[in-house]
Amino acid sequence: EAGVAQSPRYKIIEKRQSVAFWCNPISGHATLYWYQQILGQGPKLLIQFQNNGVVDDSQLPKDRFSAERLKGVDSTLKIQPAKLEDSAVYLCASSPGAGQREAFFGQGTRLTVV
Amino acid sequence: AQSVTQPDIHITVSEGASLELRCNYSYGATPYLFWYVQSPGQGLQLLLKYFSGDTLVQGIKGFEAEFKRSQSSFNLRKPSVHWSDAAEYFCAVGPPNTGGFKTIFGAGTRLFVKA
């Protein structure tokens, strides 16, 4: 089966610009996650969707970050305006459902803010 | 507060030698436990997981991990390391209750393999 697809793979923007990332989870997976992985650190959960509803966005900086999952399939994560400290790899992951503990990760989008 | 500690930032082992990567956690109850591997430029791949039962779990690529409740540890082992095992390894814990999946990751241990 196809894995989690993310695009773009790399993005370089200037601070205060906006950027958007796209994720297509594994077909049939109800749960979708966005993680932020800063260099030298483990992934940190930004937001979790169950179908098209938000389950947890407690660690999402809502003043500049937003995410949506229309129709419960694809998802986009947006940053506006970007700051230097947003430079990181943004990982999307999916799992079959709330009772499934294993997450399947995409390759990530490496964002550099200059 | 829940936390995951991987004490070793990086480890270097010779090809063919044994490997042990350490992971300690702080949690109110026995959590679900995971080890993931991340190769350069790639996403995370699950190596193995522990939910309950036998405390010694087998994973892919010849890896195994042992859950020790008394030590709050879940160390990853491999008897003979291959050069292709060079990567970053993450230990993670998740809540044992159903209906949620909020996993906390450790900072990772980078494995270098020398010939």
Image (cartoon, coloured by chain):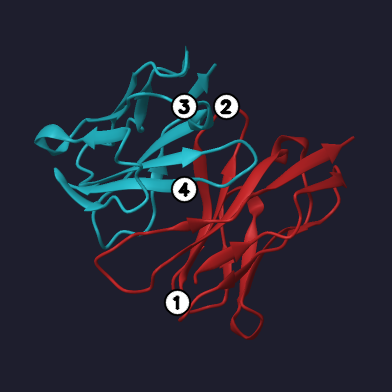
Residue furthest bottom as drawn: B70
Say what secondary structure mark 4 lies in: strand
Q: Nearer the viewer, residue A5 or A111?
A: A111
**Residue that label 3 marks:** A83
Q: Is residue B52 above or below residue A26?
A: below
For the residues labelled 3 and 2, the Cα–Cα distance comes to: 23 Å
Q: Is residue B72 left or right of residue A13?
A: right
Residue A113 position within the rendered picture, expressed as x and y whole percent measured from the top left: 51, 20
- Left or right, A9 with respect to B82, comes to left
Asked if the residue at tag 4 contacts the one at tag 3, i.e. Cβ–Cβ closer than 8 Å, the answer is no
Q: Amino acid at mark 3?
A: Lys
Q: Which residue is mark 4?
A: A44
Dot 3: chain letter: A
Q: Nearer the viewer, mark 2 or mark 4?
A: 4
| Residue beneath the point at 52% across and 32% down | A85
Rounded to the nearest angstrom, the CA distance separating label 1 from label 2 is 32 Å
Nearest to N terminus: mark 3 or mark 4: 4
Query: Chain in cyan?
Result: A
Name the amino acid, label 1.
Ser
Image location of residue B88, percent across then percent down:
66, 42
Which amino acid does the dot numbered 2 rest on?
Gly
Q: Looking at the image, is mark 1 or mark 2 earlier in the sequence?
A: 2
- Disc marking residue B52: 1
Which chain is painted in red? B
Circle 1/circle 2 CB separation < 8 Å: no
For disc 2, the marked residue is B41
Report which quarter residue A80 is drawn in.
Answer: top left
Chain of the residue that carries numbered disc 4 in the rendered image = A
